[in-house]
Image (spheres, grey):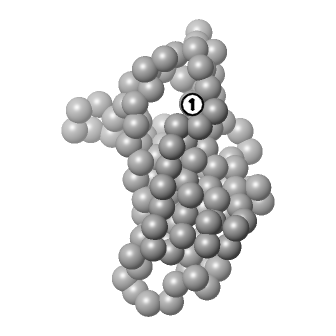
Amino acid sequence: MTSGFLTTHVLDTAKGLPAEGIEIVLFRVNGDSREKIATAVTNDDGRTDTPILPAGDFATGTYELIFYAGDYLRRTGQVTVEPLFLDQIPIRFGINEAEIHYHVPLLLSPYSYSTYRGS
């Protein structure tokens, strides 16, 4: 069994606050196919309550997180015109070490986003 795990969180950089209530879906990617393996929603700290990919399920490979940011941006009144510039935000990344903590955060505003490999 591996000891690595995957976490994520979302920060609303326009408001300077954690982004609560964003649905996140995690897929394992294999070539042209994706397998949905987890769904979570951010809490009041912008984090998921547990690792989105815990140690027992953690494995090397390619993954994709989909952040449903549009629902959050609408709900917080930051966007009012459809279609939104940002709605669903995919982040595809690789895990190549099975024994470490991977952290993939999303820094979000209505018209931009960024991510990085955190710790």
Q: Is residue 116 above or below residue 57?
A: below
Regarding residue 85, the answer to whether it shows in the image is: yes
Residue 7 percent coordinates (x, y): 62, 38
Furthest residue toward left: 32
Regarding residue 21, the answer to whether it shows in the image is: no
Q: Which residue matches tag 1?
A: 102
Furthest residue toward top: 1
- At horizontal 40% and vertical 37% (from top left) the residue drawn is 93
Q: Is residue 32 left or right of residue 86?
A: left
The foreground one among 96 and 32 is: 96
- At horizontal 42% and vertical 70% (from top left) the residue drawn is 86
Q: Name the quadrant containing residue 52.
A: top right
Q: In the rendered image, which quarter contains the C terminus?
A: top right
Q: In the rendered image, which quarter contains the N terminus?
A: top right
Residue 11 percent coordinates (x, y): 64, 59
Q: Is residue 69 left or right of residue 50?
A: left
Furthest residue toward right: 44
Amino acid type, residue under disc 1 in the picture: Tyr
The foreground one among 38 and 111 is: 111
- At horizontal 57% and vertical 47% (from top left) the residue drawn is 105
Residue 117 percent coordinates (x, y): 52, 37
Q: Is residue 2 above or below residue 103?
A: above
Q: Is residue 44 above or below residue 100?
A: below
